[in-house]
Image (cartoon, rainbow, N blue to C red):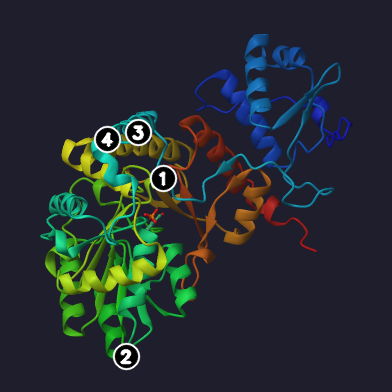
Amino acid sequence: MNNVKDYMGSGGQWVPRLERGSSSKHQAIFDALVADIANGQLRLGDRLPPQRAIAAALGVDLTTVTKAFSKARTDGIIRATTGRGSFVAIGAVDESRGPYANFVSHDLSRNSPPRLAKIDQALAKEVDTALSLGTLAGVLNYQDTGGNWANRAAGANWLAKRQIASSPERIVLTSGAQSALFAVCHLVTKKSNHVCVGRFAYPGIHTVAFQQRLQLVPLAMDGEGISPEAFEDACQRAPIAALYITPTLDNPTTATLPSDRRQQIARIARQYSVAVIEDDPYHDLIPGAPSPIAAIAPDVTWYVATLSKCLSPALRLGFVSVPSAEASTQIAATLQAMTMMASPLFASIASRWIYSGFLREAADELMHENEERQKIAARLLYDQQYETNRHGSHLWLKLPEPWRATDFTNQCERLGVITLGSSSLSVNSPFVEAVRISVGAASSQESLRDALTILRSVIVGGQSNANRAMV
Ligand SMILES: Cc1ncc(COP(=O)(O)O)c(C=O)c1O
């Protein structure tokens, strides 16, 4: 069934308004098309003028318009019907098919690192080698929960570069950071179920809290992260079992906790016997990141490292440094009930890459790619208020009035861009209208540019979009 309505609407007279700042003329035409769909000037089903007419109106070559149209077709924004022309295939509001009927082409809601061909190829080669080498037969079978000794030693070696003095008996391998967080929370909340977190926190800790019926205690944050005073205050008010913290490039706020706050938090945790769950997936992406809390107070800190952000989430590999050898036996028992063990095949590949230096190389490449993507964001959001780190894979955009985060994410989703609103990240505390945008998740720099162009047009279109009748 052809779901594109055949009517001219206002599209028949459409002339793109070219803004400065686009990288080329055809990109400017594409951007104008997206912007006019977002602001409602073009609607789903509108027939666009012939390409030749647009070229004549703009005084540009026909091939320039053809290029813009063909990109819009590939992205699912317009649809061409032989002999009848091109039609708008998405709409700011698709009244006939409901708000979620449009094709979603850019999912920036999941905080992924960029996909890099270099990493994909290296992984393919390593898997191939591992499978073909008879000497690696051990990795094709079950292993002890927590990982074999060689892989734990590799983990200790990796974390030593972060000034963490661990040892193989205090390192445990997990299937990514998420399962580590579940296991650690399960273990350290036996006497009290109160866990302190920043007032905005990584969605995965909310999931764990929900499943384990934990009571999250929100702490005040500022541009440098969690306030130590708020942490101490919470410790004085109630029996706190643990503090969950992402000290470097916080998710979502992007704050990096300075050394003195890390020292203060370590002191408070020791004084009130609170376990620190230090979730540090972004450490290798941030040059000069301060030493982790685990380097200051290893006796109370459960340090969670993962390869997901500095290599690939596909390996599902985390390395946890725990306070003692006894703690590693305890957490292994929990992990055995959950996932049995991390993938031995990927653990062996990761260990080789820790020693060969490829892990560092991959992190450098990702840092560089993130930096390029942050520049694209800076160009498109130059007049907006947002927090970021130039090497990070996400940013935290504060929405201007009159936007509410839920309306904004809904409106962007109708136009094919998914972001994560602040309500999914906040712990029942005074609300901030903001969205987390993962620049790493876009399939390419070009796709990011397109997605942010749509997003920008929604922000700028503010009042008219927000006033859409809610019935
Ligand atoms: C702070 C934080 N912790 C943990 C994770 C999940 O890591 P993994 O893929 O290793 O489970 C993420 C992913 O976005 C994250 O941002």
Disc sitting over residue 35 in the figure: none
Cα separation between marks 2 and 3: 48 Å
Could you tell whether 293 is left or right of 51 in the image? left
Could you tell whether 271 is left or right of 385 in the image? left
Q: Mark 1 belongs to which amino acid?
A: Ala
Disc 3 target residue: 119
Q: In this view, does 394 lie above or below 337?
A: above
- In the image, residue 361 lies at what x, y percent? 24, 35
Cα separation between marks 1 and 2: 41 Å
Disc sitting over residue 314 in the figure: 1
Which is nearer the N-term, disc 2 or disc 4? Answer: 4
Please give the name of the residue rendered at 34% of the width and 37% of the height, measured from the top-left corner: 371
Which is nearer the N-term, disc 3 or disc 1? Answer: 3
Cα separation between marks 3 and 4: 24 Å
Which is nearer the N-term, disc 1 or disc 2? Answer: 2
- Image quarter for ligand 1 equals bottom left
Secondary element under disc 4, as helix, strand or loop, is helix
Q: In this view, does 148 lie above or below 11?
A: below
| Front one among 303 and 36 | 303
- In the image, residue 296 lies at what x, y percent? 12, 67
Disc 4 target residue: 134
Q: Residues within 10 Å of mark 1 (few under 14, many from 20)?
A: few
Secondary element under disc 1, as helix, strand or loop, is helix
Disc 2 target residue: 237
- In the image, residue 291 lies at what x, y percent? 16, 58
Of labels 1 and 4, the one closer to you:
4
Of labels 1 and 2, the one closer to you:
1
